[in-house]
Amino acid sequence: MATRFDLVTIDSPATDDIAVFWSAVLDLHEVEREDGDRWIVLADAEGCRRIGVQAGVTRPGSMHLDLACPPDEFESELARIIALGARHLGPPRHESYGSIVNLTDPDGNPFDLCAYR
């Protein structure tokens, strides 16, 4: 059997807070928890595992998520994600392919919100 992608794992000393943040941003729900808050798995509405949050040291910049939304929802989605605790790394940019903004989650992990044309 070949190696396959399972889920994105985020190391964080604040697993509960980061799990709540990503659940709200991506409309996910908790499906698995081990050792209190040492390991939390978030899934989509169909039960597909999407993100794991495990107790560990945050190392911002080693990888990031690209999130996408429709172009006409970019500003409102950006406002929603900021209200949930994300921080800007810079102002939104409007490129030939669409709009993009670089953000971090409350733990400093980078991610992008993109609205492709």
Image (spheres, grey):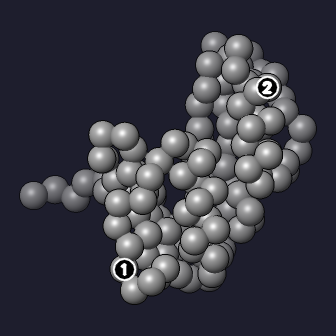
Q: Closest to the observer: 15 or 103?
A: 15
- 10 Å neighbourhood of mark 2: few (<14), some, or many (≥20)? few
Which residue matches tag 1? 34
**Which SS class for mark 2?**
helix
* 110 in relation to 72, above or below: below
The single residue placed furthest to the left in the displayed view is 1
Residue 36 place in picture, x, y as percent = 45, 83
- Report whether residue 97 is seen: no
**Amino acid type, callout 1:** Glu
Label 1 neighbour load within 10 Å: few <14, some 14-19, many 20+: few
Specify the quadrant of the image occupied by residue 18.
bottom right
Can you tell which mark lies on residue 75? 2
Q: Residue at x 80, y 35 (%)?
A: 79
Name the quadrant containing residue 31. Answer: bottom left
The circle drawn on residue 9 is none
Task: Point out residue 57 in the picture as x, y percentages from the top left corner.
Answer: 62, 82
At a point 34% along the width and 53% down the height, the residue shown is: 49
Disc 2 residue type?
Glu
Which residue occupies 30% across, 47% down?
A: 47
109 and 61: which is toward the camera: 109
Identify which residue, 82 or 97, lies in the foreground: 82
Q: Is residue 59 above or below residue 84?
A: below
x, y (%) of residue 34? 36, 80
Residue 65, compared with residue 39, is above or below; it is above
